[in-house]
Image (tube, rainbow, N blue to C red):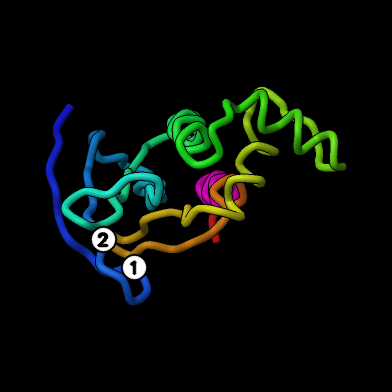
Amino acid sequence: MEAFTTRIQISYTPYIFIYTQSNNKGYMSKYYIVDSTVKTNGKNPVRLFNTIPGVIKHLEAMCKRQFNKNRAQYMNEAESIGHGGDEPTGRSFYDQMEQYFNIGVIRGGNQPVKTNIFQADTFAKVRDTQGN
């Protein structure tokens, strides 16, 4: 597993990108999370992932740091006030965390796009199998 750092621009704020996994050869190059729960050299690090389960696992750690609750505790509270229950894919948990954290995809090398990663993944799969 190769790790390296590069700087790119997301919106108007510079972040440090920390590459922790090898490049993916598909339509979507990476998923990203701006980890606002920690600081690296005074900046929020951007974590990159090849898979949605990797994103969910990191969001669980961020949830613990931000809210002092694990995923199960957070989702039990969310469910008690009317939000959907948690499921194995992590979709409901992701939907909750998306409200608090900057999460999206990296396309075309270094172009970050803040978007719902589950919808982007579905779009990429349809595009790959059915074309434009």
Q: Which portion, as a residue range, is magenta?
A: 120-128
Q: Position of residue 71 (x, y in %)?
A: 60, 27
Q: Is residue 56 magenta?
A: no
Residue positioned 60% across, 41% down in the render: 94
Secondary structure mostly seen in the magenta stretch: helix
* Circle 1 Cα neighbour tier, 10 Å, few/some/many (<14 / 14–19 / ≥20): some
Question: Is 90 located above or below residue 72 in the figure?
Answer: below
Q: Position of residue 13 (x, y in %)?
A: 31, 71
Q: Which comes before the other along the chain, label 1 or label 2?
A: 1
Q: Is residue 71 left or right of residue 83?
A: left
* Circle 2 Cα neighbour tier, 10 Å, few/some/many (<14 / 14–19 / ≥20): some
Q: Is residue 2 left or right of residue 74?
A: left
> Which disc is residue 10 wearing?
1
Placement of the C terminus among the 4 image quadrants: bottom right
Q: Position of residue 12 (x, y in %)?
A: 33, 76
Outermost front residue = 68
**Dots 1, 2 in contact, CB < 8 A:** yes
Outermost bottom residue = 12
> Which disc is residue 15 wearing?
2
Residue positioned 45% across, 36% down in the render: 65
Question: Is 26 located above or below residue 22 in the figure?
Answer: below
Residue positioned 52% across, 36% down in the render: 63
